[in-house]
Amino acid sequence: MNIKGTNYIAPSWEKMGKLIFKLGKQIIKSGSKYDWIISIAKGGWTWSRTLADYLEMDSIASVKAKLYQGVGKAAQTLTLEQTLPKSVNIKGKRILLFDDVADSGKTLAAVRDYLLEAGAKSVDTATLFFKPKSVLTPNFYSFKTSAWIVFPHEIREFINLTFKKWSKNDYYRLGLPKDQVKFFVLAYSKLKKV
């Protein structure tokens, strides 16, 4: 849906569940096996647990990396804000690096390189969404799009970032849940008046 000159999609929790199942099946059918799932925080957190269940894996860790400053605004440099916990030994291990979206692909590429430098034997990448402009095509992905994605686990964040430019009707047209839109728009309105 095009709103204010930008294409957006807002997948529901049900749609996200279908996409993670599609991704899990794809990985299983490939015959690939991994020692660890490393999730990129925060985007990969929500669905990495489900992916681990589908792949029958217990070893999950995360690395926090951030490239975006706001809706459609790329930061100039990637920030690796946290390295792997010392208890996570990836030396000689096969890693599945997971994130919600490969947008520019720079985050995936940087974290993949970081994991290889940390001693991983191999690093495959998996995302729910893949954007054609990405510098890295994930080994596995569920859906290809050029649209800005509003995930169901980040509605408040999205409203906070777009509140000054959007009306309630814009959020409704996108398909965001009305109760959440009303609550967070009201909360943000009160916050800005203080």
Image: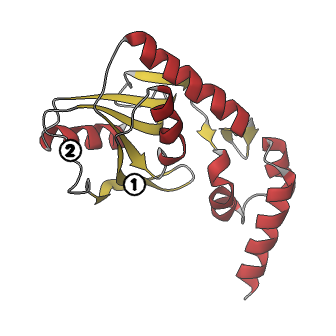
| Residue in front for this viewpoint, 19 or 135 | 19
| Mark 1 in CB contact with mark 2 (< 8 angstroms) | no
Work out whether residue 145 can be spotted: no
Label 1 packing within 10 angstroms: few (<14), some (14-19), many (20+): some
Label 2 packing within 10 angstroms: few (<14), some (14-19), many (20+): some
Answer above or below: position of 58 versus 68: above
Please name the amino acid that badge 1 sits on: Lys
Answer above or below: position of 42 versus 90: below
Kindly identify the residue that appears in the image at 22 percent across and 54 percent down: 87
Q: Position of residue 74 (x, y in %)?
A: 44, 51
| Residue picked out by circle 1 | 66
| Residue picked out by circle 2 | 114
Please name the amino acid that badge 2 sits on: Tyr
Kindly identify the residue that appears in the image at 42 percent across and 22 percent down: 140
Kindly identify the residue that appears in the image at 28 percent across and 31 percent down: 35
Q: Which mark is residue 48?
A: none
Split into 4 quadrants, where in the image is the N terminus?
Answer: top right
Answer above or below: position of 26 versus 131: above
Work out whether residue 17 can be spotted: yes
Give whichever of discs 1 and 2 has the lower sequence position.
Answer: 1
